Image (cartoon, rainbow, N blue to C red):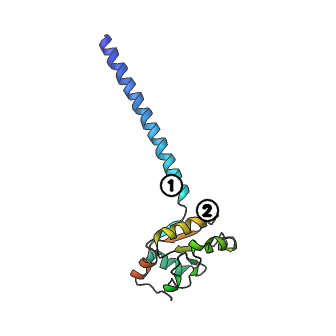
Amino acid sequence: MKKIISVLFVLALLAFTGCQTYETQMEEDNMIEDETMDEIAYTDVSPMEAKELIDNNPELIIIDVSPNYDEGHLPGAVNYYAGDGSLDAAIPSLGKEAMYLVYCHFESASRAGAQKLVDAGFTNVYRLDGDYSGWVDAGYEIEQ
């Protein structure tokens, strides 16, 4: 009888500990998910999706955040180079409700540029995944 009670006690203890561990893991996963969602509030779009945005939204503002703007850029793009503070200087004059497509010649700069807009309260921000080279590789028009 003592053996059965001991076994039941151990099983109950394991079940309780397992549930507690599961709940703790779920809480940690939810915290990570919340942090990730807070960090990324812009939308990545493929070159094809970006082309559709441009074609269907004449009010779209295209921002090249690279220092390589003069080497080629998307049609109609403006250059606010993130590295020299141009983007930071332009943010106060940009409309927060407007639609923006941010890209660069290097992925990390476009991520940082899009996130700067989001951090400043902009709500409709897209980032060209694949950046300028992805756009060119897709065969879309560029300006020089």
The residue that mark 1 highlights is 36
The residue that mark 2 highlights is 119
- Location of residue 137 by image quarter: bottom left
| Residue for point 31% across, 15% down | 4
Quick one: label 2, few (<14), some, or many (20+) residues within 10 Å? some
Give the secondary structure at mark 2: helix
Q: Which mark is residue 14?
A: none
Task: Name the residue at the bottom extreme.
Answer: 144
Quadrant assignment for the N terminus: top left
- Location of residue 125 by image quarter: bottom right
* Percent of width and height locating residue 10: 35, 21
Task: Name the residue at the top extreme.
Answer: 1
What amino acid is at disc 1? Thr
What amino acid is at disc 2? Asp
| Cα distance between the residues tagged 2 and 1 | 14 Å
Say which of 51 and 72 sits in front: 72
* Percent of width and height locating residue 39: 54, 57
| Residue for point 62% across, 75% down | 86
Report whether residue 70 is seen: yes
* Residues at marks 2 and 1 touching, judged by CB atoms closer than 8 Å: no
Quick one: label 1, few (<14), some, or many (20+) residues within 10 Å? few
* Percent of width and height locating residue 16: 42, 28
* Percent of width and height locating residue 32: 49, 49
- The numbered mark, 2 or 1, whose residue comes first in the sequence reads 1
| Residue for point 32% across, 11% down | 2
